[in-house]
Image: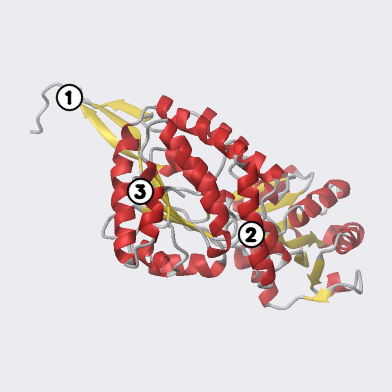
Amino acid sequence: MSASLKAIDGNADLPALMTELATRARTAARALALASPEQKNRALQAMERAIRASAPAILAANAEDVAEVRAGGASAAFIDRLTLTDARIDAMADGIATVHDIPDPVGVVTESWQRPNGMTIERVRVPLGVVAVIFESRPNVAADAGVLCLKSGNAVILRGGSDSFRSCRAIHDCLVQGLHEAGLPEAAITLVPTRDRAAVGLLLSGLNGGVDVIVPRGGKSLVARVEAEARVPVFAHLEGVNHVYVDHAANLEMAKSIVLNAKMRRPGVCGAAETLLVDRKGASTNLKPLVEMLIDAGCEVRGDEAVQRTDPRVKPASEEDWDTEYEDAIITAKVVDGVTEAIAHIHDHGSHHTDAIVTEDAAAAGRFLNEVDSAIVLHNASTQFADGGEFGFGAEIGIATGKFHARGPVGAEQLTSFKYRVHGTGQTRP
């Protein structure tokens, strides 16, 4: 942690601390909005180098965080979300390199037209200003959010969970090093230097206009609190109650591969499947192999009566199960009457995050893609592709499930707004 942040961390007056952080971030945001793409890219290159070079220090800090939560009885899925490895640090650095390579969104003219009176009107992308990102567990979010906000010309205030405090500090040190090397203000990427939970409430207040938008990244309780208490706009990120519907026209081997990956690749991520829906017309051939595969892979299956009959190891599903994001190796399973009932079930129980259909029937796929009202809808692909990196964004701050401004993976472009520039030649309005 930088010397300046250490000094602030010793300040017992938390409201004053948070106000000072927001004031510094606001000043940095003005500088970033005017920074050239070349200067921002120099910072990103330096950050990537620093992350790779500091991998041992990051892993050591992360090991302390993991040991602490393991001693506290955290679940295996929670520990997986928190844990960093050499491969995950490499992926973090690779994501920074990808963000470096994407076009700079700031200043891009998205539309231009001329009025009959001769005036030319342009719509141009501009930064949002100061973004507050409140997240839990996943320390890589510190890097993802930091570099995406930098690329889009925004200052960011990062408030990670107490469980990842040491890991986030080690990652933040690398980001600050990159800012210094490029001559950009350190406050462009600020890490709240305290575990005090009251800091979250202060961020939600907007800090007297110091914060322009809040992005929550975490469990249902965190997101619910942010949406209930925030006094500034929020990029909604609801839980991922995601579905895979296996149609009667599905290729069984493809369905098995997709379902297993969607649930078990990383059960704790927001793109993991939580419910399997199987078409009744194909249940006689598809249901038992899918259920047995999941159970044999270590996944607990909770099903309706039809699913329970396929395997004695299946547990009964409760009404609550259909609405639950497990973030663990647990899945609910149900037999439905075709794509119509599958869509209805997703409408009633989904979270508008990510849902997939497996089928060789183009008409069924078309209906599913058109009628399922989720931020991401897939045909013959795993729900675990719900990730900004997989969309070519380099990284993401989160998956926005609301319908205003941003939806789906929130990357650099989604972290901009726009303004209108009007060019005249002396026109006045009659």
223 on left or right of 206 = right
**Residue shown at 52% from the left, 41% from the top:** 174
Residue 95 screen position, x and y as percent: 59, 38
Q: Who comes first in sequence, dot 1 or dot 3?
A: 3
Tell me the colour scheme of the image: secondary structure
Of tags 1 and 3, the one toward the viewer is: 3
- Amino acid type of the residue that numbered disc 2 sits on in the rendered structure: Glu
Mark drawn on residue 64: 2
Of tags 2 and 3, the one toward the viewer is: 2
Residue 122 screen position, x and y as percent: 30, 29
**Residue shown at 64% from the left, 66% from the top:** 68
- Amino acid type of the residue that numbered disc 3 sits on in the rendered structure: Val
Circle 1 packing at 10 Å, graded few (<14), some (14-19), many (20+), is few
Residue pointed to by mark 3: 130
Q: Who comes first in sequence, dot 1 or dot 2?
A: 2
> Can I make out residue 109 in this image?
yes
Q: Identify the element where label 1 is drawn.
A: loop
* Quarter of the rendering containing residue 360: top right
Q: In 3D space, how far apart are the residues under numbered discs 1 and 2 (Cα atoms)?
A: 61 Å
> Can I make out residue 369 in this image?
no
